[in-house]
Image (tube, helix red, strand yellow):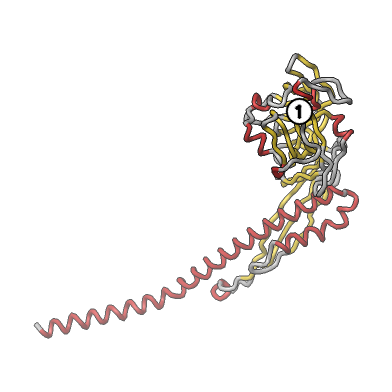
Amino acid sequence: MRWLDRRLRRIVDDERGANAVLIAFLIIPMLGFGALALDISAQHAERTQLQHGADSAALAVARACALDEPACEGRAQSDAGEFVEANGGTPVDGRADVEELNLTENEVRVAASAEFPHILESLITGDQETTVRARATAEWGYPDRGTTIPLAIADCEMSSHPTQPADTTNPQRFKLILANGNGSNPPCLSGPPGGFGWLAGADCEATIGIGGISQGETGIQSYRRSGCSDEDFANLLCKTVLLPLYDSVYEQGHRGEYRITRFAAFVLTGYQVQPSNRQYCGGTPLSPTFDNGEKGIQGYFVEYVSIDDADFELGDVDYGTDLMVVRLSD
């Protein structure tokens, strides 16, 4: 029996040697697959960074053209390069190329690329690098139709209170009020009192087009009929919103039909629904403050470039509101 036991042990030892040979044969392809997986993962990270860079570069060039179209063509390449470079670096920096800048169609296409080195894969396959690419297209224009909050302001109020820089530290605010709850028309427009109105909508949104007629109501609390809550109204404080302006109203009691002329960017800085319910941006009273009997809103118009606002259709007509939309496109 002992000789049989020794024989079996020798057989087992021989099998262990065979496993070692098998592992030796498999280790090279295993290392190759591991190197390939690591390189693919790093290459994916590089492509993601390039896409971020291309997106940022396209938006930056489009914004520059929106602000100053005559000057943007000469600086487009340098602007694009700056933003692609700022979003690169792992493991290599990318380069930018403005492939198309169409000032007639208000569109720019930017390509970002980088020569990605195969750090591990090159040891197996001999391939040294791959060119990784990403592209992005952006457009700019003036909004002529879109979905926004259902608040409209009299067009002539903007003529009386022109736009201010969006980053102003001491804006000149004004009030649109319903005097003592009885109503007062703005001096520049006959129609519903206060110089503003709430348009018909749902879920605190309304789809509005320039030149169209929108149904609406007067009164500071009419926002509730458009699906807006008190919290929605309060959340508008301190924010820049794109609002429609109207130049005429057909009145039917508290209801009306508002003719929309253009969109403008407006910062709501305060409101008073009732003497016991007034709120200001930042929580402290702002000049001009509301008197006890007034109901209305407070704010100011601003120069504004809205980035990536997909809720608006764009045109090429300047409506004179210092408002432009810039966004990525297909």
Q: Quadrant of the N terminus?
A: bottom left
Query: Tag 1: residue type?
Result: Glu
Compared with residue 137, is residue 177 higher up or lower down, i.e. above or below? above
Compared with residue 46, is residue 305 higher up or lower down, i.e. above or below? above
Mark 1 — residue? 294
Drawn side of residue 286 relative to residue 21, left or right = right
In front: 300, or 321?
300
In the rendered image, which quarter is residue 239 located in? top right
- Residue displayed at 18% across by 80% down: 8
In front: 244, or 175?
175
- Residue displayed at 16% across by 84% down: 6
In front: 122, or 231?
231
Q: Position of residue 261 (x, y in %)?
A: 83, 29
Furthest-left residue in this view: 1
Drawn side of residue 32 relative to residue 126, left or right = left
Would residue 157 be seen by someone viewing this image from the given angle?
yes
Q: For numbered disc 1, what is the local secondary structure?
A: loop
- Residue displayed at 58% across by 65% down: 42
At label 1, counting other C-alpha atoms closer than 10 Å, the crowd grade (few under 14, some 14-19, many 20 or more) is many
In the rendered image, which quarter is residue 322 located in? top right
- Number of marks in the rendered image: 1
Q: Quadrant of the C terminus?
A: top right
Drawn side of residue 24 relative to residue 190, left or right = left
Would residue 238 be seen by someone viewing this image from the given angle?
no
Compared with residue 124, is residue 278 higher up or lower down, i.e. above or below? above
Q: Position of residue 305 (x, y in %)?
A: 79, 45
Furthest-top residue in this view: 252
Q: Position of residue 29 (x, y in %)?
A: 46, 71
